[in-house]
Structure formats: C-alpha cells, structure tokens
Amino acid sequence: GAVVSQHPSRVICKSGTSVKIECRSLDFQATTMFWYRQFPKQSLMLMATSNEGSKATYEQGVEKDKFLINHASLTLSTLTVTSAHPEDSSFYICSARESGGLYTEAFFGQGTRLTVV
Amino acid sequence: AQSVTQPDIHITVSEGASLELRCNYSYGATPYLFWYVQSPGQGLQLLLKYFSGDTLVQGIKGFEAEFKRSQSSFNLRKPSVHWSDAAEYFCAVGAPESGNTPLVFGKGTRLSVIA
C-alpha cells in the first residue's frame, strides 16, 4: 500500500527556536496533504490543509504565522513551527490522499513528537 | 457538516472475549468510513474501510465492521481480543467524492485488555 513518511519522529527544541517537520508521499502524488495535531489522550484535530503550489488553508484558531506550511511538490509538504514555545509541544501527524482519485483512503505518517523545553 | 461520535471513551475487555466499539456518524449522503488504530506514540494504521457494496467489511488483525445506514453506525467488532489489541481506536468519515478533503475523526476509544 501507499506510504507516507514523516520526519523526524521525535524532536526536542529550545523555546524560541523553529522546527521543521517533513511529510512525504513515497509512491503516489498528493495534491493535498493534511496536518493534524494530537494532544495526549485526545483525538486528531485538523490544523491545516496543504495545497501543492498554493497557500495552505488553516482551520479556525490555528496561527498561520506560527505554523508555516509549504507544499512545494506533489510528494512533499513541510510544517515549520516557528518561535516554538512549550505549549506547542504535541504530537503532529500528516496525512495524504492520492490526487485525482475517488474513494481514496487517507494514509498517515508515523507522527512527530515535538517537545519544546 | 460531517461529524463522528464514539460514545465510549474507554473500554476494558478480557483477553479472548469479544469486542464491539461503537461509532455513529453524521453525513448528508453515504460517506466513506474508516477505522484506524493507534498504539502509544505511533501514527495511525488503517484497520478497514467502507465506501459501497457489502455492508459487512473485513479488515486486518481479525477486525470487521458493519455499516448500518438506518442507524448511521459503523461499529467495529472482533470475536476474540488479544492482549496486543490494546490501543486507541478512531472512527473517521470522509467525503468519497473528493480526494482533497480531510477525514473527520471521532474522539477515539481506548481499549484495555486484561488477562
């Protein structure tokens, strides 16, 4: 089956620094990728929809300037957490559905555990 | 708008016992339905999916789910639970007509398995 690779799986950074998370679709093209955030013992909350070649669409309440999304190619989307603070510590997961297809399932990356100290 | 309700936050079952996790959805037409499993600190693994055809869907690891349109439900079942099934289970709904829309997830059900 299709694979979505997310990197890094775990990162610890100092408060005030920026962290970039990559999400790659390995064997299919994804015009659209999705970024979710998951707090401990909670469900996945959609943060933004990443669109190849255009601006991302952010969900209400998600700061665009803090969570920068770039979708430069059909197989790569990046999420950069800028000026990270401890409250940004969370589990971030990306997802992609194959472009142009109907009834396509969503494939998920392995997730990135971000800890801001 | 799409929504998913998983009424049970936490379920504990004995190893070898049967399991049913409930999922109700809200969607204007026939949705695309999924069950995912997540182990601690891991991403999501697809257990099974439904978009048309036979309403009883077989998945991996011995799981199955039944789509009941009249009840807007898509409950997950397993006849005999193994200790390795302990995890978080998420039901999700998607719009089948568009591959560019995200899935909407329920809040999840945590499954504990006791000896």
Image (spheres, rainbow, N blue to C red):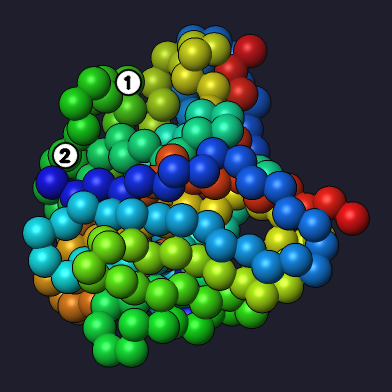
Chain under numbered label 1: A
Question: Helix or strand or loop: what does disc 2 sit on?
Answer: strand
Q: Secondary structure at mark 1?
A: loop
Q: Which mark is residue B104?
A: none
Q: Quadrant of residue A67?
A: top left
Q: Please, is residue B77 above or below residue B56 in the view?
A: above
Sequence-first tag of 2 and 1: 2
Question: Disc 2 residue type?
Answer: Thr
- Which image quarter is the C terminus of chain B in? bottom right
**Which residue is the site of mark 2?**
A57
Mark 1 burial class by Cα count in 10 Å: few <14, some 14-19, many 20+: some
Most foreground residue, A20 or A40: A40
Lateral position of residue B13 relative to residue A58, left or right: right
Residue A89 visible, this angle: yes
Q: Is residue A21 visible?
A: no
The residue under label 1 is A66
- In this rendering, the answer to whether A8 lies above or below A116 is below
Residue in the image at 71% along x and 47% along y: B12
In the rendering, at what x and y percent does residue B16 appear? 80, 69
Q: Residue at x 13, y 46 (%)?
A: B1
Q: CA distance from mark 2 to mark 1?
A: 14 Å
x and y percent of residue A52 in the render? 19, 55
Q: In the image shown, does B56 or A99 lie closer to the viewer?
A: B56
Q: Are marks 2 and 1 on the same chain?
A: yes
Question: Is B112 drawn above or below residue A64 in the view shown?
Answer: below
Q: Amino acid at mark 1?
A: Lys
Instruction: Give x and y (percent) for residue B84.
Output: 78, 62
Q: Residues within 10 Å of mark 2 (few under 14, many from 20)?
A: some
